[in-house]
Amino acid sequence: MTGDRKAGRLAAVTTQLVQDPLAEQAAAAAAAAGVTVRELEGVDELVEADGVLSQVWGGDAQLALPANQQPVSLLRAFAHTGNYLAGAFEGPELVGVSVGFAWGSPEERKLHSHISGVAEPCQGKGVGFALKLHQRSWAACRDYTGITWSFDPLVRRNAWFNLMKLGATIEAYHPQFYGFMNDGLNAGEDSDRCLVAWPVAGEVLPAEIRPTGGLPLLVEGAGGEPVLAEPTGAPDAVYLCQIPCDVVALRREDPALARRWRLALRDTMGAAIQAGWIASRITREGCYVLVNGAV
């Protein structure tokens, strides 16, 4: 491709981004968070991205390599082959990173958001939301139909962000999805993960909170322990699975109790999702709301 043709193609994509309502939403979210979100450029920025992810995951981002061992080789390969690598900048400083790659059929291309992280000083300021909306706009401009990613279903703040802030839906539950992990956040823990789906078309429509009755599958006992109930009810029944308020703190304070929660959620919510239930909401009390996806 000649320089003129390449420049023309880039200009067309840029124009499309500017005119796209999703791009406008992404720009507004970035402005609200006080950052600029854009695709990463050059090896130097990829080295910075490796540093941000390593800091968030306690030294092992599950993706990139230390700077003295062929740095960011995988990130570089991702970028070169047209995958998603973007960063959030607070002034000149890179404070957030998101990496995704393509999958699916030619008729239904999807983007899998493999890893995203925000540096600790900037967490809780909307940077993650800005990255997600940029990712969605980027995917829409390239004819992706949806975005998927995985998350630990025991981490309530991530569940709230994914289901209630973004409006994604949990469609699968995978025990030990990554096997045993060595990073600072997950070392020693089973890597159970939920897979969420987020459509690209349309606006960001967070799930609405309604007073919801349901049959409890998992609740928190008086001593903070998981209490299981037998799943009974019709095919159109609504089930509720509660998770602890802060499992990250619980892992530090009482690892045995945290593991009991892991196994309890796997035996209840995990089994329900494998049987065809889906979750698109979580209550403020930390109860996943499960409905039969076939009804």
Image (cartoon, rainbow, N blue to C red):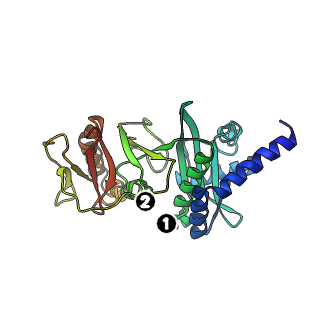
Neighbour class for label 1 at 10 Å: few (<14), some, many (≥20)? few
Furthest toward the right, the residue is: 3
Tell me if 251 is positioned left or right of 60 in this view: left
Could you tell me residue 53's position as x and y percent? 58, 51
Q: Earlier in the sequence, mark 1 or mark 2?
A: 1
Could you tell me residue 153's position as x and y percent? 36, 48
One can see residue 226 in this view: no
Q: Amino acid at mark 1?
A: Gly
Tell me if 274 is positioned left or right of 128 in this view: left
Residue for badge 2: 165
Q: Residue at x 86, y 42 (%)?
A: 3
Helix, strand or loop at mark 1: loop
Judging depth in this view, the residue of 188 and 201 nearest the camera is: 201
Could you tell me residue 222's position as x and y percent? 16, 61
Helix, strand or loop at mark 2: helix
Residue for badge 1: 124
Check the image and report above or below for 181 versus 240. above
Q: Are marks 1 and 2 in contact (CB under 8 Å)?
A: no
The quadrant in which the C terminus is found is top left
Neighbour class for label 2 at 10 Å: few (<14), some, many (≥20)? some
- Observer-side mark, 1 or 2, equals 2
Q: What is the number of the mark on residue 226?
A: none
Q: Amino acid at mark 2?
A: Lys
